[in-house]
Image (cartoon, rainbow, N blue to C red):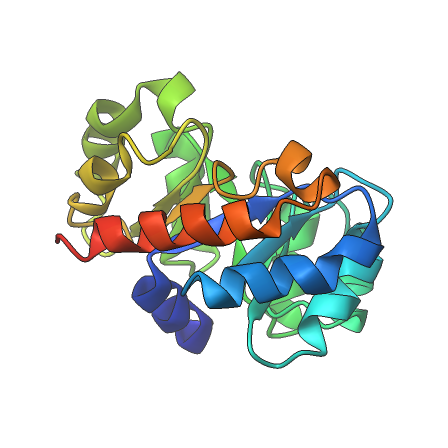
């Protein structure tokens, strides 16, 4: 878990991807690597998720995880295809327990102090704050994180180039999840040069920290 979190902390941005056609996965990975953003959270929102994880993970030059994971069977499917970390939209107890028991890095979604207390009970010190902007953004994140000195966060939801730096400047933020550089229409239309451009633009933002 710690090694993956260190990698995410260096990358600063986790592209959150919903991909409809696995045949686009390799070119998408190439676009992200060229954009200095060698990371992908492939969400289980489409039927192509598992195959896309497999295609990307075999490259070895990009950190691939699975997102929108809400069942243990999805965890198994993701890991079997090469996913290195698991992200859930909420705190799914069975998913968290399975991941911990099998030494799989997991970032459950939280948005309340109660869920943060639950994360601590399971020995977690990194969680996903979701949906970030809808739940009050940075103001809420600072408020709910205040009593939890050692907890770090990966805010996701409503984050883009306009507010990325504001989030990354919050001391307890490890990295931010976002989809603005990998929107589904850009992938479907195979606009990989645009994805690279947006990725380069995104990574240039956190260099201002």
Left or right: where 119 falls relative to 64: left
Task: Report whether residue 75 is seen.
Answer: no
- Decide: is 60 above or below 98: below
**Residue 33, position in %: x, y?**
50, 67
**Residue ranking furthest to the bottom:** 60
Residue at the image point whose x is 77% and y is 47% from the top: 71
Task: Answer whether residue 111 is visible to the viewer in this image.
Answer: yes
Pick the front one: 67 or 39: 39
The residue at 42%/58% (across/down) is 124
Residue 10 falls left or right of residue 99: left
Residue 188 point in image, percent of width and height = 74, 39
Q: Count numbered badges in the picture.
A: 0
Q: Give 74 or 81, whichever is nearer the viewer.
A: 81
Q: Residue furthest right?
A: 47
Q: Nearer the viewer, residue 102 or 52?
A: 52
Instruction: Give the image quarter of residue 189.
Output: top right
Residue 156, image x and y in percent?
44, 37
Looking at the image, residue 125 sits to the left or right of residue 148; the answer is right
Identify the residue at horizontal 55%, vertical 72% (top origin): 62
Residue situated in front as seen by the camera: 54 or 113: 54
Residue at x-position 42% and y-position 77%: 3
Is 158 above or below relative to 126?
Answer: above
In the rendered image, residue 87, in percent from the top left (x then y), is placed at 58, 50
């Amino acid at each position: 878990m710690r090694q993956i979190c260190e990698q995410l902390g260096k990358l600063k941005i986790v592209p959150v991807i919903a991909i409809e056609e696995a045949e686009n996965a390799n070119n998408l990975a190439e676009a992200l690597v060229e954009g200095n953003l060698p990371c992908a959270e492939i969400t289980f929102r489409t039927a192509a998720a598992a195959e896309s994880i497999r295609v990307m993970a075999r490259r070895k030059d990009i950190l691939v995880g699975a997102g929108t994971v809400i069942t243990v069977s999805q965890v198994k499917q993701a890991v079997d295809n090469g996913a290195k970390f698991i992200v859930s939209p909420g705190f799914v107890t069975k998913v968290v327990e399975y991941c911990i028991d099998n030494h799989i890095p997991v970032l459950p979604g939280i948005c309340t102090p109660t869920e943060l207390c639950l994360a601590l009970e399971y020995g977690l010190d990194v969680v996903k704050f979701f949906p970030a902007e809808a739940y009050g953004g940075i103001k809420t994140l600072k408020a709910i994180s205040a009593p939890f000195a050692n907890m770090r966060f990966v805010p996701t939801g409503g984050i883009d180039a306009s507010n990325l730096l504001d989030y990354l400047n919050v001391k307890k933020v490890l990295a931010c999840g976002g989809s603005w550089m990998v929107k589904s229409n850009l992938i479907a239309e195979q606009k990989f040069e645009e994805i690279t451009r947006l990725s380069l633009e995104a990574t240039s933002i956190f260099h201002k920290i």
